[in-house]
Image: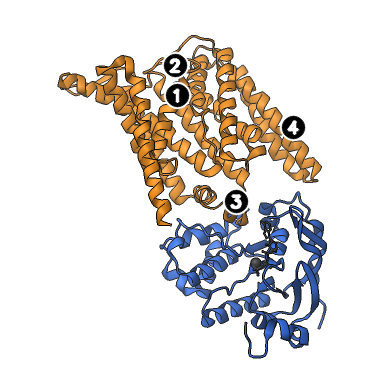
């Protein structure tokens, strides 16, 4: 391997690693706040990318139907609940968020030809369709069993993942798609060249990570999420509802997932089921951080990115094996560490 | 003296852990701007009573707060919005967050309702507990026991409650700080806040309280104005002792 190739692989590793880092952060967030191991994270990556591709092809993405149907279900359940408890004043908000908003989106899309819109508008539309699925799935699948043990929540996660993958095949077919780069072409640095899309990915991932950092460090809602993760009862006593925190963390996770899909679809062909492997690599990063530490999770995810890139050069057939084998020493080291802390107590 | 309007009334309140009944048909009235104390031995059900009133535990019976029935469907978060605040026995602080952030989150519900004046409340809390201002940047988990109590109390005050429920606020504190805490409690009365105070320190509690209840094995065994209870021979014998054992 010469210097040129090493640089190219490093570029690959860094871009993929940045995406894995975003997903790892989302996984840590969801687990810390809700104790859900969010296996369907990867589906949001695929849905984001494929929804964008469908819009660019000038068609109505089937994810739009999903958001309308799930929204109606949430509106029916929450609406009935509000009426039963005599709090009809909550009704307008419930209906507006879950029924009116998806329908408005549908009307909007029925009225314009999405293929003719500028890329930024298409991206926004794709996010507007896919992101609300996050809190809706939380409401329907997780909220009723929010107090269940982690294992039960994990089983539900696997079920949600399977359903979403199946729906993905139904919605988008088995064909893979790529979307055009945000900016075509490459930057010539002399010793190597850098695709503009790679720059976009690095810039936007960095911006998102900084944004998340500021959100958790400065805004009161970010602090409320951290508080729920630290002490659920304490948070409830402050009026921070576990449900609100759950929905908020799922919204962020869905946003991060869908945005990641939009970012990488110009450099990777994505299929309806590609999300799973991508999400799993983020998961390896999150595990390195013990599902609790954000910086270690992000660093771990970058490591996964580099490991994947370089192993694809030396042992291309085994690259997934190598990446996922990483988890074994990590778990060993983690379990040894855990035993030490228990002894200390 | 005019009789103040009732803020909270509980009737025939029972709470069970599985088959074991920890509270049996408890009745309790708290008027606006009044300090009511519940004293009783360990395991009597005092914490259980507060948890149930706050909505943390389901109970049977009737609770009416500010003219509104608080049934099982009214979640903790909603009760916070109605002006109920609990300083729980275990304090439940956010250990890895700074003292300042803990206090800020005490006002989370006010913030969400768009209530201004959170800054002013923070300044007031810092005036009551200057120690917290000095430690604003420190993480809550590293505070001393007494400082933690102050933080729990300060965080509750940040919510500007109508009814503040305190579960043994003097637990493990030095006498000087206990006096400070009780002074704060009496000051709250002046501000129109009602306080439901659960205490082991029966003497101090009955001194500040307008009305008191004695809870024993899940049932109210005695009730009366604070001063009357303090001189009741049964209370003196069981809770005050001759030399003030407690
Ligand atoms: N989660 C629980 N499960 C089963 N029993 C419980 C539970 N919590 C409390 N109890 C029991 O209910 C009874 C009342 O407990 P509670 O904590 O309300 O007492 P307390 O009056 O606050 O006592 P203390 O003064 O020691 O704080 C006790 O007998 C206790 O063992
Ligand atoms: Mg107790």
Find residue A261 and name its label.
1
- At x 41%, y 34%, the residue is A22
Q: Which residue in the protein does label 4 denote?
A: A76
Q: Could you tell me which chain the residue with mark 2 belongs to? A: A
Among the two numbered marks 3 and 4 on one chain, the one whose residue lies closer to the N terminus: 4
Find residue A270 and name its label.
2
Q: Are marks 1 and 2 on the same chain?
A: yes
Q: Could you tell me which chain the residue with mark 1 belongs to? A: A
Q: CA distance from mark 4 to mark 1?
A: 31 Å
Q: Which chain is orange?
A: A
Q: Are marks 4 and 1 on the same chain?
A: yes
Residue A336 drawn at (x, y percent) = 37, 43
- Regarding mark 3 in the picture, which secondary structure is present there? loop
Crowding at dot 3, Cα within 10 Å, few <14 / some 14-19 / many 20+, comes out as: many
Among the two numbered marks 4 and 1 on one chain, the one whose residue lies closer to the N terminus: 4
- At x 75%, y 68%, the residue is B217
Q: Which residue in the protein does label 3 denote?
A: A240
The image quarter in which residue A327 lies: top left
- At x 76%, y 75%, the residue is B213
Colour scheme: by chain
User: Is residue A103 in view?
Assistant: no
Say if mark 4 contacts mark 1, CB within 8 Å: no
Q: Colour of chain B?
A: blue
Say if mark 1 contacts mark 2, CB within 8 Å: yes
């Amino acid at each position: 391997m010469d210097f040129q190739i090493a640089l190219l692989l490093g570029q690959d590793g860094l871009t993929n690693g940045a995406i894995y880092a975003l997903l790892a952060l989302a996984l840590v967030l969801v687990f810390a706040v809700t104790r859900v191991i969010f296996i369907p994270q990867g589906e949001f990556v695929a849905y984001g990318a494929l929804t964008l591709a469908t819009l660019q092809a000038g068609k109505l993405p089937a994810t739009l139907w999903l958001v309308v149907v799930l929204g109606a279900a949430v509106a029916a359940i929450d609406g009935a609940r509000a009426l039963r408890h005599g709090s009809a004043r909550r009704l307008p908000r419930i209906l507006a968020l879950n029924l009116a908003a998806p329908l408005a989106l549908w009307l909007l899309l029925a009225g314009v030809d999405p293929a003719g819109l500028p890329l930024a508008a298409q991206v926004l539309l794709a996010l507007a369709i896919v992101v609300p699925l996050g809190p809706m799935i939380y409401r329907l699948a997780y909220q009723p069993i929010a107090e269940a043990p982690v294992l039960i929540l994990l089983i539900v996660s696997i079920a949600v993942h399977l359903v979403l993958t199946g729906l993905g095949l139904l919605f988008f077919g088995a064909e893979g798609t790529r979307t055009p780069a945000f900016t075509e072409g490459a930057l010539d640095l002399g010793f190597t060249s850098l695709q503009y899309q790679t720059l976009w990915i690095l810039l936007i991932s960095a911006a998102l990570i900084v944004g998340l950092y500021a959100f958790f460090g400065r805004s009161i809602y970010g602090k409320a999420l951290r508080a729920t993760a630290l002490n659920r009862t304490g948070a409830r006593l402050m009026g921070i509802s576990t449900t609100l925190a759950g929905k908020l963390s799922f919204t962020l996770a869905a946003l991060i997932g869908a945005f990641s899909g939009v970012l990488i679809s110009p450099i990777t062909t994505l299929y309806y089921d590609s999300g799973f492997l991508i999400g799993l690599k983020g998961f390896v990063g999150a595990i390195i951080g013990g599902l609790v530490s954000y910086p270690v999770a992000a660093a771990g995810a970058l490591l996964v990115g580099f490991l994947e890139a370089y192993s694809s050069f030396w042992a291309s057939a085994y690259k997934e094996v190598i990446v996922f084998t990483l988890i074994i020493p990590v778990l060993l080291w983690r379990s040894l560490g855990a035993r030490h802390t228990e002894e200390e107590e | 003296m005019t009789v103040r309007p009732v803020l909270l009334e509980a009737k025939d309140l029972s709470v069970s852990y599985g088959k074991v009944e920890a509270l049996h048909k408890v009745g309790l009235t708290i008027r606006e701007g009044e300090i009511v104390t519940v004293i009783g031995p360990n395991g009597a059900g005092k914490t259980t009573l507060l948890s149930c009133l706050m909505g943390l535990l389901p109970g049977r019976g009737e609770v009416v707060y500010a003219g509104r029935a608080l049934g099982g469907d009214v979640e903790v978060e909603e009760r916070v919005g109605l002006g109920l605040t609990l300083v729980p026995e275990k304090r439940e602080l956010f250990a890895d967050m700074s003292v300042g952030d803990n206090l800020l989150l005490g006002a989370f519900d006010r913030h969400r309702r768009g209530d201004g004046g959170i800054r002013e409340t923070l300044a007031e809390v810092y005036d009551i507990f200057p120690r917290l201002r000095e430690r604003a940047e420190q993480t809550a988990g590293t505070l001393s026991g007494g400082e933690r109590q102050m933080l729990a109390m300060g965080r509750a005050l940040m919510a500007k409650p109508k009814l503040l429920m305190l579960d043994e606020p003097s637990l493990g504190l030095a006498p000087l700080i206990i006096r400070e805490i009780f002074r704060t409690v009496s000051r709250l009365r002046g501000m129109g806040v009602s306080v439901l105070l659960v205490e082991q320190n029966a003497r101090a509690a009955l001194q500040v309280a307008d009305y008191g209840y004695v809870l024993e094995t899940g049932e109210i065994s005695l009730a009366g104005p604070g001063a009357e209870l303090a001189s009741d021979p049964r209370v003196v014998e069981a809770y005050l002792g001759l030399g003030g054992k407690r």
